[in-house]
């Protein structure tokens, strides 16, 4: 496999003394070389744009929204007339006799055609409220789409950074294995001349085995991150550029972040539109208790319809119909009570979403606010560990330190470098998580090079459609 080759090549790299940041950049280049072609480096913004355009979760949510758009013309059909054309054709045999008249004995072929037009004049405002309810459903679904887009972009940024982190960690572990191999060789040479004991050799062998195990774990983690990257973004990573925290759109204080999230977050907006739809549903059901007034026009033309040969008949009527509901066994009343309980549930869901969003903002703010300090601490730890390792090695040469001391110092430096890579990863991921938590992780805020999906285009194309089987895209 391409990525298996990439990892094998990464395992053979020998830059044991490089800084963690430089290691990451070299690892990213290794990923690009593994793709089998020289390509322009992929940026985080470019990966997010690909996810926005091609992610199947976003695309299926867009399709669901287009289906919900059709609820508006369905509701508006109540304003429009229902036209029905009926026809009859058959044969009839008649044998009739009455006292004092001629006997009728005939076979006729009655046939007629009728056109009926029904226009509703009033139905307890059910049509009007139904249209408003359908529009609220459309607006709520648009917010659900926006929330799906946010979650996908956040996942894409996280998996992008996961690949960078896991590649850098794999290189660190690989370089550590090479150092431990050299350490074991030197220890065996010293054991051969009596400078160290068999215990020192065993300690070096144990550290090498542990290092190889860590490298295999890092290799597995990288493969998993690559698979997640492909699932969300749609293609394998190649020549990934280092990611940077997003700052555009982020508030200055936690209080401002919470206030923004309570207004702008799509999950809260979707819940509010759900309340509107539930309120209108109650009104639609209550409309069933009111009278219905229809205007019905009918035109009928028939031939031999009464069994009389060669006879014709024409009729036309225009009637007003009034239907007053009296009692339906309590079904309508039960539906209304049920709708009111559902309305209460949707209102509680708004409160629940507000609490969920607020908790997410506080959590993301805490991680992002502390990320800079964690990076500075990790950098200081790396510098101190490098100095300590150099000192321990020099002291070991003159017999003041043991092989175990050198191995421990080497492991401490490795852990510090891994902590630095992880802290840099966490800062970028936390910035996107915070932007998503306040409801601003979007194509426009990130200034991605991707055409923004305009949900109103399809809605405008279908909302006033009177007929037609084909969708706007020609299906």
Image (cartoon, rainbow, N blue to C red):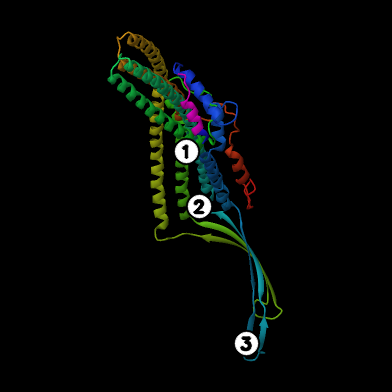
Give the left or right position of residue 357, taking residue 232 as reference: left
Q: Secondary structure at mark 2?
A: loop
Numbered mark located on residue 270 in the image: 1
The residue stretch that appears in magenta: 4-15
Relative depth, front residue between 342 and 329 = 342
Q: Label 2: which residue?
A: 124
Nearest to the eye among marks 1 and 3: give it: 1
Distance from the alpha carbon under mark 1 to that under mark 3: 72 Å
- Residue 293: percent from the left, percent from the top? 54, 57
Q: Residues within 10 Å of mark 2 (few under 14, many from 20)?
A: some
Query: Residue 195 falls in which quadrant of the image?
Result: top left
Query: Residue 424 falls in which quadrant of the image?
Result: top left
Give the left or right position of residue 129, taking residue 399 as reference: right
Q: Earlier in the sequence, mark 1 or mark 3?
A: 3
Say whether residue 197 is magenta. Answer: no
Q: Secondary structure at mark 1?
A: helix
Relative depth, front residue between 442 and 166 = 166
């Amino acid at each position: 496999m391409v990525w298996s080759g990439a990892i094998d090549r990464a395992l053979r790299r020998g830059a044991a003394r490089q800084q963690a940041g430089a290691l990451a950049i070299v690892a990213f280049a290794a990923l690009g070389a593994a793709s089998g072609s020289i390509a322009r480096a992929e940026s985080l913004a470019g990966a997010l744009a690909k996810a926005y355009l091609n992610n199947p979760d976003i695309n299926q949510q867009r399709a669901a929204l287009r289906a919900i758009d059709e609820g508006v013309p369905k509701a508006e059909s109540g304003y429009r007339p229902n036209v029905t054309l009926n026809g009859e054709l058959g044969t009839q045999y008649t044998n009739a006799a009455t006292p004092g008249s001629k006997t009728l004995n005939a076979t006729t072929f009655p046939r007629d055609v009728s056109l009926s037009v029904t226009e509703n004049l009033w139905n307890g405002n059910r049509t009007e409220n139904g249209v408003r309810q359908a529009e609220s459903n459309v607006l709520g679904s648009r917010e659900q789409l926006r929330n799906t887009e946010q979650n996908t972009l956040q996942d894409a940024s996280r998996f992008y950074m996961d690949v960078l982190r896991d590649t850098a960690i794999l290189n660190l572990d690989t370089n550590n294995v090479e150092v431990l191999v050299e350490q074991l060789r030197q220890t065996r040479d010293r054991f051969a001349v009596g400078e160290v004991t068999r215990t020192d050799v065993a300690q070096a062998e144990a550290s090498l085995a542990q290092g190889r195990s860590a490298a295999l774990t890092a290799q597995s983690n990288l493969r998993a991150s690559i698979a997640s990257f492909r699932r969300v973004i749609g293609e394998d990573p190649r020549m990934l550029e280092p990611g940077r925290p997003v700052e555009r759109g982020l508030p200055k204080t936690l209080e401002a972040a919470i206030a923004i999230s309570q207004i702008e977050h799509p999950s809260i907006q979707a819940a509010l539109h759900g309340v509107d739809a539930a309120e209108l549903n109650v009104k639609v059901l209550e409309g069933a208790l009111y009278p219905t007034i229809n205007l019905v026009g009918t035109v009928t033309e028939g031939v031999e319809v009464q069994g009389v040969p060669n006879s014709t008949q024409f009729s036309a009527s225009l009637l007003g119909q009034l239907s007053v509901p009296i009692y339906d066994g309590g079904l309508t009343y039960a539906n209304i009570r049920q709708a009111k309980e559902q309305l209460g549930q949707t209102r509680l869901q708004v409160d629940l979403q507000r609490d969920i969003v607020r908790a997410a903002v506080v959590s993301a703010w805490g991680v992002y606010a502390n990320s800079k300090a964690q990076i500075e601490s990790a950098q200081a730890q790396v510098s101190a560990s490098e100095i300590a390792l150099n000192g321990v090695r020099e002291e070991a040469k003159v017999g003041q330190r043991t092989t175990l001391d050198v191995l421990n110092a080497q492991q401490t430096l490795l852990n510090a470098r891994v902590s630095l890579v992880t802290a840099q990863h966490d800062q970028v991921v936390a910035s996107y998580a915070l932007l998503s938590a306040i409801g601003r992780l979007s194509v426009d805020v990130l200034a991605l090079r991707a055409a923004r999906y305009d949900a109103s285009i399809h809605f405008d194309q279908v909302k006033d459609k009177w007929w037609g089987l084909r969708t706007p895209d020609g299906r």
